[in-house]
Image: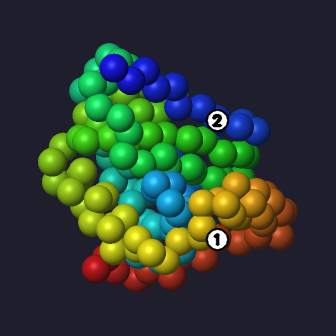
């Protein structure tokens, strides 16, 4: 049984306030920002954040650690087989949402930063986002 506690650093941020998403797989960190995949990924997480909250004890291990970076800090959530764990608790992910999240990650596998550089790139992104001169650019006119 797994007991997960999602956490926040530097101030809790909501999923909707996320400016960058970093998915940590078994050997890389995949960054999502500005593009269509980022906005779709964030929307999927927001839409499913509070669907049927369940007990925090889960039978299967998380498949992905997902770091959310925003202006006020970072948060970590975990995504498992049809579930996600946030600071609010653990909720179920409907089949279509889970499949789409998995597809977004699979398409980008092999393009991320090596495991040894994940924390460094997260700190760099966080510092850049929290700079008062940072402006978020939405480079996605439509979903693909």
Alpha carbon separation for disc pair 2 and 1 = 21 Å
Establish if 144 lies above or below 93: below
Mark 2 or mark 1, which has the lower sequence index? 2
* Position of residue 36 measured from the top left corner of the image (x, y, whole percent): 41, 75
Is 39 placed left or right of 29 in the picture?
left
Could one spot residue 98 in this view of the protein?
yes
Q: Quadrant of residue 60?
A: top left
Q: Quadrant of the C terminus?
A: bottom left
Q: Tag 1, which secondary structure?
A: loop
Tag in front: 2 or 1: 2
Q: Relative to the observer, which residue lies in front, 4 or 141?
A: 4
* Position of residue 48 measured from the top left corner of the image (x, y, whole percent): 31, 42
Establish if 133 lies above or below 62: below
Q: How is the image coloured?
A: rainbow
Could one spot residue 50 in this view of the protein?
no
Callout 2: 10 Å neighbours few (<14), some, many (20+)? Answer: some
- Residue reaching furthest right? 132
**Which residue is located at x 50 percent, y 60 percent?**
27
Callout 1: 10 Å neighbours few (<14), some, many (20+)? Answer: few
Q: Name the residue that disc number 2 marks.
A: 8
**Which residue is located at x 63 percent, y 53 percent?**
69
* Position of residue 98 measured from the top left corner of the image (x, y, whole percent): 24, 51
Q: Quadrant of residue 61?
A: top left
**Which residue is located at x 64 percent, y 71 percent?**
136
Q: Relative to the observer, which residue lies in front, 129 or 123?
A: 123
Q: Quadrant of residue 55?
A: top left
Is 15 placed left or right of 92 in the picture?
right
Q: Name the residue that disc number 1 marks.
A: 136
Establish if 120 lies above or below 98: below
């Amino acid at each position: 049984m797994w007991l997960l506690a999602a956490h926040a650093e530097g101030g809790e941020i909501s999923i909707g306030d996320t400016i960058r998403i970093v998915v940590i797989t078994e050997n890389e960190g995949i960054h999502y920002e500005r593009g269509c995949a980022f906005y779709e990924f964030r929307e999927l997480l927001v839409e499913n954040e509070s669907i049927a909250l369940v007990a925090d004890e889960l039978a299967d291990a998380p498949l992905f650690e997902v770091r959310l970076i925003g202006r006020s800090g970072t948060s970590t959530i975990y995504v498992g087989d049809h579930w996600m764990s946030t600071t609010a608790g653990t909720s179920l992910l409907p089949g279509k949402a889970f499949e789409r999240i998995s597809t977004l990650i699979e398409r980008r596998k092999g393009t991320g930063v090596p495991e040894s550089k994940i924390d460094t790139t997260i700190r760099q992104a966080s510092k850049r986002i929290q700079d008062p001169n940072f402006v978020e650019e939405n480079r996605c006119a439509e979903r693909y």
